[in-house]
Image (cartoon, helix red, strand yellow):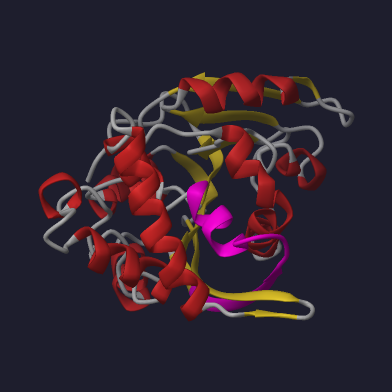
Amino acid sequence: MTEPTWDPAQYLRHAGHRARPFTDLLARVPGLPGDPPRIADLGCGPGNVTALLADRWPTAHITGYDNSPAMLEQAQAHAGPTPGGGRLDFAPADATAWTPAEPYDLIVSNAALQWVPGHLDAFPAWLAGLAPGGTFAFQVPHNLDAPLHAQMRELAATPRWQDRLGHVLRAGDSVHAPGVYLDRLARLGCATDVWETTYHHVLTGEDPVLDWVKGTGLRPALTALADDPGAREAFVAEYRDLLRTAYPSSPYGTVLPFRRLFAVARKEA
């Protein structure tokens, strides 16, 4: 998989739809042991959903971590004291190597772990960094079998694109089955809740599903073809035509079914 170059403005074009799963995740997080609590957000992106943590825990010291300089630059707009007396800051970190340097009451991740190869192996160190009674919570897209991704991979594997894109996109095991997460977290001693939800996002505008995926799943392909604008435009046009068939428009918009996987694991107090 190619390490993607991120475009915060493109990502934020669908900020409302992308934030909803995070609020649904936070609704299932139990009370935190610290007062004030210490919170880490892994893969914070442009910081817009990280700021929602201060609504739930007003006095918390919250740090968002990301490995994209562009995303962190955008996130700085949310940094500083929070209305409830807490603090929000951001720092560079790569989740593939990050380990807690201090005890956290909550480690949370929103739609980021699918970009972290081997993230299951990081769980023991992350849980060890939780305070007793603390929580590890995350959500990830679980829809690699949907046309959105399947057609992208199939197109990348065609003779025209295979040499440049055949090994660029996320692999099928970038997200595991719900039972795999449940088993791993439960065996690590956590009281664990795992579930899935399929959202049916109604998108508007011209080619809105393409516009959506340009901010996320298509980023590795766009990055790999960045040095060849003509090829990039050709690949995007072919993919766009496939999406138009898979996700037809209607008078009220274009429906994008999107399945997500959630996990909330509470460490023993």
Query: Could you say which is closer to the camera, residue 212 or residue 53?
Result: 212
Give yes or no for residue 96 being in the magenta stretch.
Answer: no
Residue stretch rendered in magenta on the structure: 194-215
Instruction: Relative to 116, say whether 74 is above or below.
Output: above
Tell me: 116 left or right of 195.
Answer: left
Instruction: Relative to 145, say whether 25 is above or below.
Output: above
Query: Could you say which is closer to the camera, residue 222 or residue 94?
Result: 222
Tell me: 6 left or right of 47.
Answer: left
Instruction: Relative to 67, say whether 230 is above or below.
Output: below
Instruction: Relative to 102, say whether 249 is above or below.
Output: below
* Residue at (51% x, 73% y) in the render: 244
- Give x and y (percent) for residue 70: 52, 23
The mark total stands at 0
Tell me: 77 left or right of 44.
Answer: right
- Give x and y (percent) for residue 56: 78, 48
* Residue at (44% x, 68% y) in the render: 241
* Residue at (28% x, 45% y) in the render: 122
- Give x and y (percent) for residue 106: 56, 44
- Asked if residue 141 shows in the view, the reply is no
- Give x and y (percent) for residue 32: 65, 48
